[in-house]
């Protein structure tokens, strides 16, 4: 009796495996008219999460933005820059990302401001440098001696794109300006602003 049960169980297992294999196979045969055989193909497209951020030249060498104030106009009003990779007065910027809201944070090289290297000359506050974006969806964080200013590029794309809930694809220029509202000591004042993009 036990032997018969074992034989029956083995036969059922073989039959089940045969049916299962046929159900999963991507092939079939039709022997009756009108003939028709359908097979499924499963596709997967795997997209990794990524974040691309550009400010200035796209070669790893940062722009050096220079404000040269004429002697006759020191302290009398805004001055445009040279040195940006977008026509001198501006720098190209771009954000491409696909995993949620991007945040851009600005930090600065010195909490005292831009300096000449001689403390007695005084300093020029980073907040005297402002940015005008060409794309309202890609604004720049405000600069200050304290640093930590942030901006959030608007989710979505400059042209239609899929995945709007998590995708950012924005580009434009940031035009630099120095307020030139005070009369500092003569000299070349230098400092570095670092713009860092982050994404969840």
Image: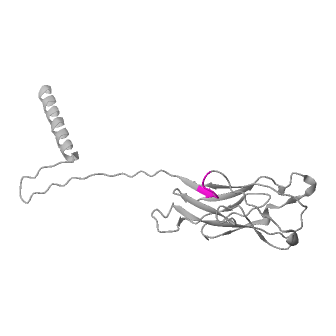
Residue furthest to the right in view is 120
Number of numbered tags placed on the structure image: 0
Q: Position of residue 94 (x, y in %)?
A: 59, 61
Give above or below for 46 relative to 15.
Answer: below
Magenta residue span: 53-59
Report whether residue 100 is seen: no
- Tell me, yes or no, whether the highlighted magenta stretch contains residue 106: no
Q: Position of residue 20 (x, y in %)?
A: 21, 43
Give above or below for 99 relative to 131.
Answer: above
Left or right: 185 with respect to 113?
right
Left or right: 106 with respect to 166?
right
Image quarter where the N terminus lies is top left
Image quarter where the C terminus lies is bottom right
Left or right: 34 with respect to 111?
left
Residue 15 appears in which quarter of the rendering?
A: top left
Q: Position of residue 54 (x, y in %)?
A: 61, 57
- At horizontal 85% and vertical 72% (from top left) the residue drawn is 73
């Amino acid at each position: 009796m036990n032997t018969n049960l074992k034989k029956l169980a083995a036969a059922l297992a073989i039959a089940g495996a045969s049916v299962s294999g046929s159900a999963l196979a991507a092939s079939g045969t039709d022997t009756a008219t009108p003939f028709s055989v359908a097979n499924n193909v499963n596709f997967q497209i795997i997209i990794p999460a990524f974040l691309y951020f550009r400010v200035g030249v796209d070669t790893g060498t940062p722009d050096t933005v220079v404000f040269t104030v004429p002697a006759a106009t020191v302290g009398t009003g805004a001055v445009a820059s040279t040195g940006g990779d977008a026509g001198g007065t501006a720098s190209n910027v771009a954000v491409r990302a696909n995993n949620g809201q991007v945040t851009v944070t600005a930090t600065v090289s010195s909490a005292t401001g831009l300096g000449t290297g001689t403390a007695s000359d005084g300093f020029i506050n980073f907040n005297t440098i402002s940015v005008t974006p060409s794309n309202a969806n890609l604004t720049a964080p405000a600069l200050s001696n304290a640093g930590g200013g942030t901006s959030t590029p608007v989710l979505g794309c400059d042209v239609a794109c899929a995945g709007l809930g998590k995708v950012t694809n924005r580009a434009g220029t940031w035009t630099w300006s120095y307020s030139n509202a005070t009369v500092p000591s003569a000299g070349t004042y230098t400092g570095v602003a670092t713009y860092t993009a982050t994404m969840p």
